[in-house]
Amino acid sequence: MTDIVDTEQFNADELQPPDWLNSEFITEVLSKYEKVSELKVTDLKITPASAQGDHYASVMFRATAEYTTAKGSFSKPLIIKTMPEQEGHKKDMLSDSHIFTTEIGTYCKALPEFERILREAGDDTKLYVPCLYHSVEPRQVMIFEDLVPQGYSVIRDRPVTEKELKKVFAKLAKWHAVSMKVINEKPEFLKDFKYGIFEMPTIESDPFVTNGMAGFIEMLDQKPEFRKYNPHFEKVKDIYLKRLADEMQEYRKNRRDDSYYVLCHGDFHLRNMMFKENKQTGAPEDVMLVDFQFCNICPITVDLTYSIYMLMEPEQRREMGKDLIHHYFTVLVETLKKIGFKAEMPTEARLWEQIHRNRYYHFFMISTLLPMMLALKSNALKMHDLIQDPETRRKSYLLENYVKDVAMLLPKYEELGHFKDL
């Protein structure tokens, strides 16, 4: 049933599917989805669904189900997503979290409604791939039709182009715009989307998060050209995670009149999106966002700031994504007008004020997530080791591409006033 070729390429907990993931289970799933009682799976091939570094907060398999019904023989490519069953850090981190119910709600409630609103306005943008099956008992499982046979793929071995990034930000802008309308007109509809990364039960005790700033400060001290910035980060090292949590949870705990709020994606990086090219021209035709486990209502800047560090290339990061965020904002306002947004229109100046005001988020990104992301992009280190092994984390701070990025970003922080009145 399994067909594994290169075990080094995949996450260890995705090399062998669990016993329950078998022909009988998939027969039941497809029978319900196709509404055909006499359906029978005749062959099932299962492989890991993603490469090392693509994700951490789930276990994923790719399956091809051959099946028969009264109408003949068929084949369906599937993606099966479930929670970790192997004992260890990943299971401990995720077992008591809300990530699965959040993702089910996003796929099955929020995004269908968002698409309905876009359709009413004459916009046929696809925001998600339909979920064929989901359950939380006896186990947490989601099943989707595989996008790869439809021509979509994850970018892993090359930089993402500006044209591709514009596709990404246009789609995010439409998602955000519709969510702004829903939050303004019927906020109760999204009331269950209140679990972001800082609602994870283990987040404030996980060494990957809690030791990030200490590792960053240690690196600054080793590099003479960075030492002048050390006092700023020493000053905030004991409080910045609390300040960061306040920024991320602002909508729920301390809503501001001068902030914009949306249903954010929450984990907006390159491996959580799949691109499709035009077969004739090779130009980017579409992008599909995936992995909605951290969707929650929060400041609009959460996805945008995250994207600066986790999605953009260094040349765009150097300018804090100015051109791409301008493109995003243009589509955001166009969409708000198209769908009949009734509140005051956002302004680009206020959006940038909000991005810069949330400085502790920038500090978290540069000190904790950026070194991991750059280590993965350069294939220098593995995600499992980066998250769990302190020595591997220490190495990531000294990688050449990360040091270059820090050298570019710290003067930018100074210019933007991020170090004032800490």
Image (cartoon, helix red, strand yellow):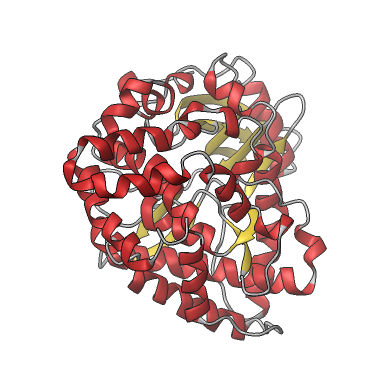
Q: Would you place residue 167 above or below residue 311 in this image?
A: below
Asked whether residue 189 appears in the rendered view, the answer is yes
Q: Would you place residue 62 above or below residue 125 in this image?
A: above
Q: Would you place residue 237 above or below residue 112 in this image?
A: above
Q: Would you place residue 82 above or below residue 259 in this image?
A: above
Q: Residue at the location (29% across, 56% down)?
A: 409
Q: Quadrant of residue 126?
A: bottom right
Q: Residue at the location (64% across, 29% down)?
A: 26
Q: Is residue 189 left or right of residue 174?
A: right
Asked whether residue 369 appears in the rendered view, the answer is no
Percent x, y of residue 56: 48, 32
Percent x, y of residue 382: 33, 27
In depth, the one of 246 and 166 nearer the eye is: 246
Label count reads: 0
Q: Residue at the location (46% across, 30% down)?
A: 208
Q: Is residue 178 left or right of residue 309?
A: right
Percent x, y of residue 371: 32, 40
Percent x, y of residue 319: 29, 67
Q: Residue at the location (68% across, 78% down)?
A: 120
In depth, the one of 316 and 339 nearer the eye is: 316
